[in-house]
Amino acid sequence: AKHTVQIGKNVTIGHAAVIHGACIEDECLIGIHATVLNGAHICSGSIIGACALVTEGMIVPTDSLVLGVPGKIMKQNPQFIDPIRENATIYQKLSQNHKQGRYEIYGLDDEKNL
């Protein structure tokens, strides 16, 4: 394969997102249903919004927010890193809880109260 997938530390990849032959550096958030294509490089601290399309070979600079189809860099802000870290920490704790059998099971009646 010409392109391999590389995923850094503390990266959150949303439900149904597709990472295909791309590099995702540390502490990024890839939104739900986002697609990152071959040769794309997402630099640290960046957010790829839900349903965004990062096109083949696109370089996303550090601390960027990418939205849309095709994805466009909307802004850069080093403050993105705090919610990204918080999100990664929450998912890491949840995975440990599930691994240890500590999780709640919701029934149909419970869903009405969510």
Image (spheres, grey):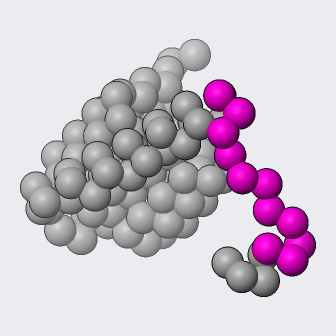
Q: Is residue 6 visible?
A: yes
Q: Is residue 91 magenta?
A: no
Figure quadrant of the C terminus? bottom right
**Would you identify the image quadrant in which residue 79 lies?**
bottom left
Q: Nearer the viewer, residue 36 or 70?
A: 36
Q: Is residue 53 visible?
A: no
- Horizontal side of residue 58 vs 38, given as left or right: left
Q: Which residues are magenta?
A: 99-110
Write the residue at 54% across / 66% down: 51
Front residue of 108 and 49: 108
Direction from residue 4 to residue 45 in the image, left or right: left
Picture coordinates of residue 110, whole percent (x, y): 79, 74
> Residue 95 location, x and y as percent?
57, 36
Q: Secondary structure of the magenta portion, mostly?
A: loop
Magenta stretch encompasses residue 107 = yes
Residue 57, percent across and down? 37, 41
Height in image: 100 above or below 87?
Answer: above
Identify the residue shown where x is 32% and y is 51%: 86
Q: Residue at x 60, y 59 (%)?
A: 33
- On-image quarter of the N terminus: top right
Percent from the top left, x then y, of residue 17? 59, 50
